[in-house]
Image (spheres, helix red, strand yellow):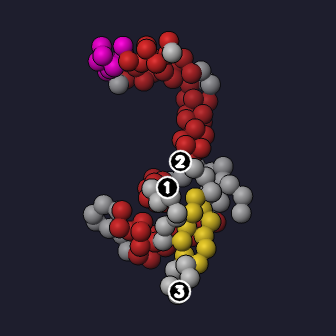
């Protein structure tokens, strides 16, 4: 299965965040354990895992000796998805301009003088 270039829905992203937290992959029960209350039904998580597999975000293998249980592993890393998403935000909302995007966040986030100083240090490095 090839890696997906699609965008994740809010809930799909939440499922992927849970999967990304397990270096060896995770089953539906692992994802459900990481979910905040109120927890969805097991079948809901299983459906989202299947959708993410079909979209090319996940692959799976059966866990030996545990019946039909599947261990899902990400085909797209968190860093890769974040990078791609931020590139899309930059392109779609800021005309591809990093400067415009940074100006937006600096003005909208009401950064403190210390935060601005830290950012300037990072830029100069």
Residue on which the image places disc 1: 20
Q: Is disc 2 placed on a helix, strand or loop?
A: helix
Measure the C-alpha gap from mark 1 to mark 3: 24 Å
- Secondary structure mainly formed by the magenta segment: helix
Residue 122 is situated, as x and y percent measured from the top left of the image, at: 46, 18
Around disc 3, counting alpha carbons within 10 Å, would you say few (fewer than 14), some (14 to 19), or many (20 or more)?
A: few
Which of the numbered marks, if any, corresponds to residue 39? none
Measure the C-alpha gap from mark 3 to mark 2: 30 Å
* Residue 125, placed above or below residue 14: above
Q: Is disc 3 placed on a helix, strand or loop?
A: loop
Residue on which the image places disc 2: 78
Residue at 61%, 73% (x, y): give it: 61
Residue at 35%, 62% (x, y): give it: 35
Residue 52 is situated, as x and y percent measured from the top left of the image, at: 57, 63
The magenta span reads: 110-117
First along the sequence among labels 1 and 3 = 1
Q: Is residue 97 left or right of residue 18?
A: right
**Mark 3 touches mark 2? (CB < 8 Å):** no
* Residue 49, placed above or below residue 103: below
Residue on which the image places disc 3: 65
Front-lying residue, 114 or 63: 63
Residue at 42%, 18% (x, y): give it: 119
């Amino acid at each position: 299965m090839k890696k997906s270039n699609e965008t994740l829905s809010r809930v799909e992203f939440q499922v992927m965040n849970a999967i990304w937290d397990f270096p060896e992959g995770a089953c539906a029960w692992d994802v459900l354990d990481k979910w905040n209350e109120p927890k969805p039904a097991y079948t809901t998580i299983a459906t989202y895992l299947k959708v993410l597999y079909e979209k090319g975000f996940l692959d799976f293998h059966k866990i030996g000796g545990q019946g039909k249980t599947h261990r899902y592993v990400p085909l797209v890393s968190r860093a890769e998805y974040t990078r791609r998403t931020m590139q899309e935000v930059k392109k779609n909302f800021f005309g591809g301009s990093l400067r415009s995007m940074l100006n937006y966040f600096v003005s909208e986030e009401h950064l403190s003088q210390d935060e601005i100083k830290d950012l300037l240090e990072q830029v100069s490095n």
